[in-house]
Image (spheres, grey):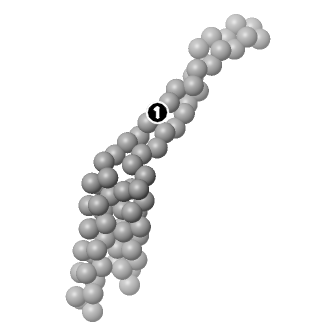
């Protein structure tokens, strides 16, 4: 039963990774601080991956589910 849950989880993760091919996160860096004057810079960090990785994860989940059914 545990491997079936793992397979289903991988399929769901693969679908999400196929639909959303990346995300961005923002960090704030202090540039200048002179007394009460503060200048900050927001820096964007994109994280991207190819949808093929999501498809491979989906296939892996299907293989795990198929393998767990053969043992039963």
Is 27 left, or right, of 9 in this rendering?
Answer: right
Res 45 visible: yes
Mark yes or no: residue 6 visible: no
Q: Can you say whether 61 is above or below 72 in the image?
A: above
- On the image, which quarter does residue 66 sit in? bottom left
State which quarter of the image contains the N terminus.
bottom left
x and y percentages locating residue 3 in the rendered image: 34, 78
Q: Is residue 42 left or right of residue 63?
A: right
13 horizontally vs 28: left or right: left
Q: Name which residue lies at 57% across and 25% down.
A: 42
Which residue is outermost to the bottom?
72
Disc 1: CA contacts within 10 A as few (<14), some (14-19) or many (>=20): few
Q: Quadrant of the C terminus?
A: bottom left
In this rendering, is residue 61 above or below 54?
Answer: below
Give the structural element (helix, strand or loop) at label 1: strand
Which residue is nearer to you in this view: 38 or 15? 15
- Nearest the viewer among 10 and 16 is 16
Residue 8 x/y as whole percent:
39, 74
Residue located 24% across and 74% down the image = 63
- How far from the left and from the top, in percent, is residue 47? 41, 40
Q: How many marks?
A: 1
- The quadrant holding residue 28 is top right
Q: Position of residue 33 (x, y in %)?
A: 67, 11
Tell me which residue sits at (54%, 33%) in the image: 26
**Residue under numbered circle 1:** 45
- Residue occupying the far front of the picture: 19
């Amino acid at each position: 039963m545990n491997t079936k849950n793992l397979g289903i989880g991988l399929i769901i993760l693969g679908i999400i990774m196929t639909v959303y091919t990346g995300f961005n996160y923002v960090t704030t860096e202090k540039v200048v601080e002179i007394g009460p004057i503060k200048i900050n810079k927001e820096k964007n960090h994109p994280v991207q991956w190819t949808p093929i990785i999501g498809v491979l994860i989906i296939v892996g989940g299907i293989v795990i589910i198929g393998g767990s059914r053969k043992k039963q």
